[in-house]
Image (cartoon, rainbow, N blue to C red):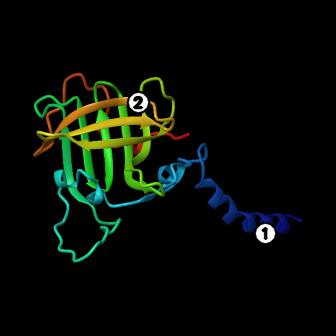
Amino acid sequence: MRLRRLREWFLLLPLLLVAAGCGPGVGGTGTGEGYALEFFGAKRASVCSASFAGELKCPSRIVIGPAKPDPAQGSELVIWVDDPAAARVVVRINVSDVDVNALCGGVRFGGTWGETSAGVRRFFGHFTAPGVEAAKPGTLDVEAVEGGGLAYTLSDAAGRTVFGPLLLQRADKDPTLSSCSTVSPAPLGSATYR
């Protein structure tokens, strides 16, 4: 009888190990790779196809005829800030991913550039904000502004503005952070998700 239970336990062990790695409350985020893109019905795309790509560090290439950039290709790291001497908002775009950290406001967003079947192109990801217990799906719109800089607007899944529009300028190096910072500059990856 004991040998039979032991054998049943070993047969169930692989299933238990797989279940332990999935979903919130059991060690995972419940989001998985590309979850926000799927949530919004979007597919991963290269940020170098964005209207503001000229403001990034995209690889130069010569193309004859119409061709879209490879979704795996994107920009080298580019940092955008409100004030390089005392940054309250820092945005990092690397490859086709973005990390937004509004240090003084406690708003964070992490996402990936994507495009919906309707042609809507923006960053799709998750955000946290004061009063929000767990990270929620959101989108980040980015627009080039005449005279230089980019305007960033963060919205929730219903399209309500959470943050912005805020005009940021490109920084040549990591900025000096504002003394109001109460939020870690670490990426959003440590947040919990709903």
x and y percentages locating residue 57 in the rendered image: 17, 57
The residue lying at 14 percent from left, 34 percent from top is 176
x and y percentages locating residue 189 in the rendered image: 41, 45
The circle on residue 58 is none
**Viewer-nearest residue: 188 or 18:** 188
Name the mark nearer the viewer: 1 or 2. 2
Q: Is residue 53 above or below residue 126?
A: below
Residue found farthest to the right = 1
| Residue ID for mark 1 | 7
119 relative to 104 in the view: left or right: right
Residue found farthest to the front = 65
The residue lying at 29 percent from left, 65 percent from top is 73
8 relative to 183 in the view: left or right: right
The residue lying at 85 percent from left, 64 percent from top is 2
Instruction: Classify mark 1: residues with Cα within 10 Å, few (<14), some (14-19) or many (20+).
Output: few
**Viewer-nearest residue: 47 or 34:** 47
* Label 2 secondary element: strand
Q: Is residue 101 above or below residue 1?
A: above
**Viewer-nearest residue: 94 or 68:** 68
- Number of callouts in the render? 2
x and y percentages locating residue 145 in the rendered image: 19, 40
- Of the residues under marks 1 and 2, which one precedes in the sequence? 1
| Residue ID for mark 2 | 161
Instruction: Classify mark 2: residues with Cα within 10 Å, few (<14), some (14-19) or many (20+).
Output: some
**Viewer-nearest residue: 121 or 43:** 121
Q: Quadrant of the C terminus?
A: top right
Q: Amino acid at mark 2?
A: Thr
17 relative to 28 in the view: left or right: right
Q: Amino acid at mark 1?
A: Arg
Residue 175 image-quadrant placement: top left
Distance Cα–Cα, label 1 vs label 2: 55 Å
